[in-house]
Amino acid sequence: MGVVTNVRNLLAGKGRSTVPLVLLPGETERLRVVGSARPGTPLSVGGELVLTTQRIVFLPWNTADVAGILSWALPKAGAPRIAGEAVKVLQGAVDGAQAGMAAVQVLPGTDGTLGRPPTVVVIDGNGQKFECGVLAGLLVPNASSRNREVRDRFLAAAGGAA
């Protein structure tokens, strides 16, 4: 796929889709919300948080077209090393997204602030915690009360305390 195709895809809005969700046998999707992994940090990754009948999965935005454009443009701008690193960062956001977590417990995390959306904390059977931001929409400010409402709806659907 060439850079022209990458640009066409982004202009057509394909950059607003996540990596695909692969459902397990017998699994169905229950709820999907805009989310972020590692919220409020420089390594925050946007995407969607999906509640299924078997697990909770974070799906990052599909960055393949952005990576294609960067890997073409940055070497031409005299920054070939930066291009490689940028593509690694973007790919790192996608890698492992399909693993999901079989949630044992889903708890409310923090309420939204200016630099961080409201969060849920998912705890798996091994006690591993994963915090994810929950937003009402792509352009909704982090501290908006609408985000807390969506977070609480996600918690209720997941069986967590709101």
Image (cartoon, rainbow, N blue to C red):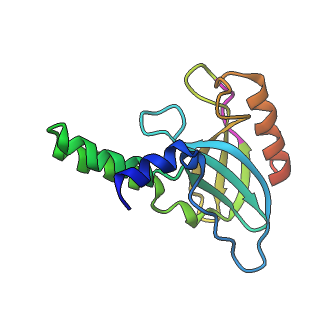
What stretch of residues is rendered in magenta?
Answer: 108-112
**Front residue of this view, candidates 7 and 115:** 7
**Front residue of this view, candidates 1 and 133:** 1
Q: In the drawing, does residue 32 fall left or right of residue 98? A: right
Residue 97 visible: yes
Residue depicted at 64% across the width and 70% down the height: 22
- Residue 55, percent across and down? 70, 64
Single out the residue that lies furthest toward the bottom: 25
Tell me if residue 60 comes above or below residue 98 in the rendering: above
Q: In the drawing, does residue 23 fall left or right of residue 7? A: right
- Residue 48, percent across and down? 64, 48
**Picture quarter with the C terminus:** top right
Tell me if residue 18 comes above or below residue 36 in the rendering: below
Residue depicted at 32% across the width and 45% down the height: 70
Residue depicted at 37% across the width and 50% down the height: 67
Q: Is residue 124 magenta?
A: no
**Front residue of this view, candidates 92 and 38:** 92
Residue 85 visible: no
- Residue 13, percent across and down? 58, 45
- Residue 115, percent across and down? 55, 23
Residue depicted at 79% across the width and 45% down the height: 155
- Which secondary structure is most common in the magenta stretch? loop
Q: In the drawing, does residue 136 fall left or right of residue 130? A: right
Q: Does the magenta stretch include residue 109?
A: yes
- Which quadrant holds residue 91? bottom left
**Picture quarter with the N terminus:** bottom left
- Which quadrant holds residue 16? top right
